Image: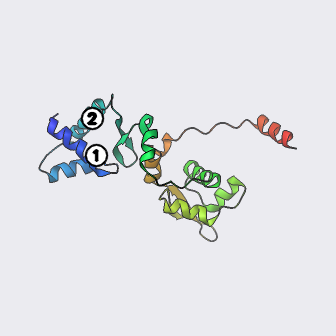
Amino acid sequence: MNIQTVNTVEALLFGAGRPLRLSEIRGLLESDGVIAELSDIKKCINELEHRYEASSLEIIEVASGFRLQIKQSYSAPITHLWNERTPRISKALMETISIIAYKQPVTRGDIEDIRGVSVSTQSVRSLLERNWIKVTGFKDAPGRPALYSTTKEFLDDLNLKNISSLPELPEIDEDSDTQVLSEVV
């Protein structure tokens, strides 16, 4: 692969500030007069991955495409560069997004049934504002409740390529469940 093309792909990934699909990279290259097949662009990305093996950078594939990012092992010192504090995710919000991610598409009522408590409007609004969930339709039931699913941005923020990349849920042993209940009572 031409080193100029590899370096151009690297510059695109670096400058984009967001994941890029192979087809987007091809379009950007073509607008600069470089004709490349998707397989050639993938070879460029493989070359860059090899280049970054002993570096603090990595190229990772997420739901929206390929992204150049700092390796997790180097992230701690970088946090001191930014003074802004990211909003903490409450336990209720974490439970809500987890249910949506694993059981999607779900309604607010489905989430309430699983959690055993009501879901606040603020929780749903917060997830919608973060663009972690979206309304994907309406259930054919009285009131036509909205069906929620996760977005590509949610997957990107968790460095996941697709929803099947989520970790498996642990099996719940019914004997241990009754044992826990008997200890509580």
Horizontal and vertical percent for residue 146? 56, 65
What residue do we see at 57% from left, 47% from top?
102
- The disc labelled 1 sits on which kind of residue? Leu
In three-dimensional space, the C-alpha distance between marks 1 and 2, rounded to whole angstroms, equals 10 Å
Q: Which residue is mark 2?
A: 48
Of 115 and 104, nearer the camera is 115
Q: How is the image coloured?
A: rainbow
Q: Quadrant of residue 77?
A: top left
| Furthest residue in direction bottom, as rendered | 143
The mark nearer the N terminus, 1 or 2, is 1
Horizontal and vertical percent for residue 85? 50, 54
Q: Is residue 54 left or right of residue 105?
A: left
For label 2, the SS is: helix
* Residue 124 badge: none
* Residue 13 badge: 1
For label 1, the SS is: helix
